Image (cartoon, rainbow, N blue to C red):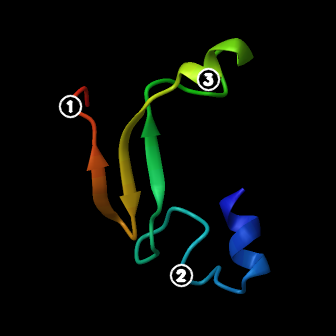
Amino acid sequence: MTINNARLTDEEAIKGSIEAGKLADFVVLSADYLSIPASEVQHLKALATYVGGREVYRSAAF
């Protein structure tokens, strides 16, 4: 998802994939949303959030 958006905005040199030197915006979730039943996705919790490679949120549970 992220690489396609980076291509659309012509920013794939600085973001869109996890590589050294690129900006990193991502979230750490309480479970893998690709492997849990769809009915459980609504119960996922954000454990940590990173913007530009810097942590901006950390749950006490993390």
Task: Look at mark 1 in the image and give the residue it sits on.
Answer: 60
Task: Look at mark 3 in the image and give the residue it sits on.
Answer: 42
Q: CA distance from mark 3 to mark 2?
A: 31 Å
Instruction: Please give the name of the residue rendered at 73% of the width and 18% of the height, measured from the top-left corner.
Output: 38
Task: Look at mark 2 in the image and give the residue it sits on.
Answer: 14
Residue 6, relative to residue 53: is it above or below?
Answer: below
In front: 47, or 20? Answer: 47
Identity of the residue furthest to the front in this view: 42
* Occupied quadrant, residue 35: top right
Query: Which quadrant is home to the C terminus?
Result: top left
Instruction: Please give the name of the residue rendered at 72% of the width and 56% of the height, measured from the top-left corner.
Output: 1
**Mark 1 falls on what kind of element?**
loop
What is the crowding at mark 1: few (fewer than 14 residues within 10 Å), some, or many (at least 20)?
few
Amino acid type, mark 3: Gln
Residue 17, relative to residue 36: is it above or below?
Answer: below
Q: CA distance from mark 1 to mark 2?
A: 31 Å
